[in-house]
Image: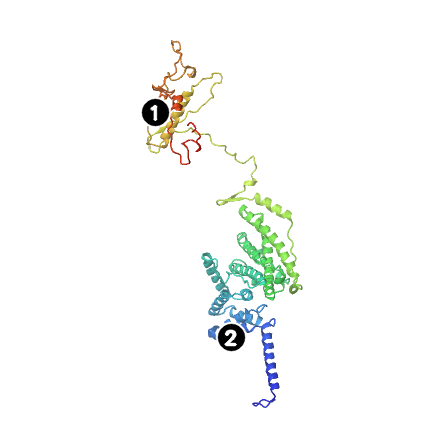
Amino acid sequence: ARSPETGRPALYLEAQALFADAAMSSKMARMMDRAGKTSIFDHGKAYYVAQTAPAEFKHICVAVEKATNSDVCGPKEKHVQTLLEVVRRGASVADVTFLVKYLNRQIVDCARWQTMLKTHVLLHRLLHNSGDEFKDQLKRMQKWVEEDRASDSRIKCMFSIRNWRDDSSVDANELSQWTRSYASYLEECVVSLDKIPRLEQLAAGSGQQSSQPTEMRGIDETALMEKLPRIQNLMRRLLECEAVNSNLATNDAVIAGVSLLLKDSFKLYRLVNDGIIRLIDVFFTMTKLHAVKALDAYKRATQQGDDLERLFRSCNSWPSFRDTKFPHIENPPNSFMQTMEEYARTAPVEEGGGSVAAANVPVQQRAPVPGPPAPARQMPLEDLMGGFTAPAPAVQTSPPALHQPQQVSPLSNFASAGNAVMAANSLVDAFAAPAQHYSPSPAAVPQQHRPAMDPAPAAQPPPQQQQPPAAGPPSSDMFGMEKPAMAMDLNALYDAPQVQASNPFGGARGGGGNGTPPLPR
């Protein structure tokens, strides 16, 4: 059968359509799935940016989009070179400012780990191969971010992705964590730009230039104690980027970032090594404050040397860094650290404008330590309202004689205690009533409780037998207070008739409800 339109067989037309669909499907599959090639989505995004970006900044936008696409590889070198030309020394400030703002917007709008990681790798490349204009814009951006992060810690922008992560898969979550550590290192690099020697001016490797001493070898003591801790903080951020998982070791985007970190680690190790050599030269002339700080920096350098050696061994096992020669790091012996600790304990201490070597003074020549001050005689206590003055307590010079015992009446002790309480209350309350001192009458104090030093009475009548008090008339207690006498006949109380009342549960009040007699009250 032939087609009436073309005259060709219908089977031929069907076969041609089938082959066309298969070719289109194969082409689409190759564009979407081939490794290392840009996907259709990234091509479309770059085309859209080229059509909508300003004409004077079109090349910048297209280069950033193509260098930070979703391909699992490092940024392509041709796009990186385009951006390096934008940030070269003496470049246009308008181009540099637009590039920094565009990179910041790229980070804010990013959701996938590929684009986020490649953007920071690109930023790392531009940071170490740019002029002062680009570095100044990055420092200004970092200060703005630090101020905004103080009010909102969840902000997401350049140098602030602490709360960002990609939850699309388990591997994406792990790669997001490594990207956050990488961003923290880049932020520390920007903060330390003008406070430590420039890393891009140092040579990395084992050549002749790398063997020359750095500027840390000849700086003074004050500058050394300012720069060396900052270099060690930057080294700590770098060591936090250690990739310990096989998923990170085989990722091309991670390998691109680790290669830049290893170059920085060689330069930082040179700075720390020269700083420690200079620290040892001036350590035994330091004051106590600088000696303690220098000892802490020396211990941190020893610990970071071990961590850096472990990082080199880990990277040397990766397929991408098997041919790389890493330096061997050896720490000084512990005996030298003990010598430094002994000097730090006996170092001179700064006081005011001079230094006093207190530890070098012999014990015999030191001033005696003053003892505790002698107790001063207590002055009279005056009331805050000015109405009462308490006498000072008498100072007892010698203890009383033990061979003259005295018998003090308990009532006398009670009276003296009451007077003391009244005097204390008058100290607290200025408007309190005047204290009334109580002195018991001699008649109320029994003979056996009277003091032994009182003279005996001249003549006393014979003791009369005391009669029991009668019920009814008032009597006085031992303090001389009158109290009514109470007389009660318990037999008459029990014999009195009881009033019966109704019980809601049955029976009489007090009974058991079943006719049992009530209990006596």
Q: Which of 276 and 22 is in front in this view?
A: 22
Mark 2 or 1: the one toward you = 1
Q: What residue type is labelled 2?
A: Tyr
Residue 520 placement, left or right of 287: left
For the question of whether residue 393 can be seen, the reply is yes
Task: Determine crowd level at label 1: few under 14, some 14-19, many 20+ residues with C-alpha closer than 10 A.
Answer: few
Q: Where is residue 70 in the image (x, y as percent from the top left)?
A: 56, 69
Q: How crowded is mark 2: few (under 14 residues within 10 Å), some or many (20 or more)?
A: few
Residue 353 in picture, x, y percent from top left: 48, 45
Residues marked 2 and 1 touching at CB (< 8 Å): no
In the picture, the quarter occupied by the N terminus is bottom right
Residue 71 x %, y %: 57, 69
Q: Name the residue under label 1.
A: 436
Which residue in the structure is indicated by mark 2?
A: 47
Q: Count how many numbered circles sit on residues in the image.
A: 2
Residue beneath the point at 52% across and 74% down? 44
* 176 lies above or below 410: below
Q: In this view, does 403 lie to the left or right of 266?
A: left
Task: Look at the numbered disc 2 and give the secondary structure of its residue.
Answer: helix
Between 333 and 398, the one lying in front of the other is: 398
Is 485 placed above or below 457 here? below
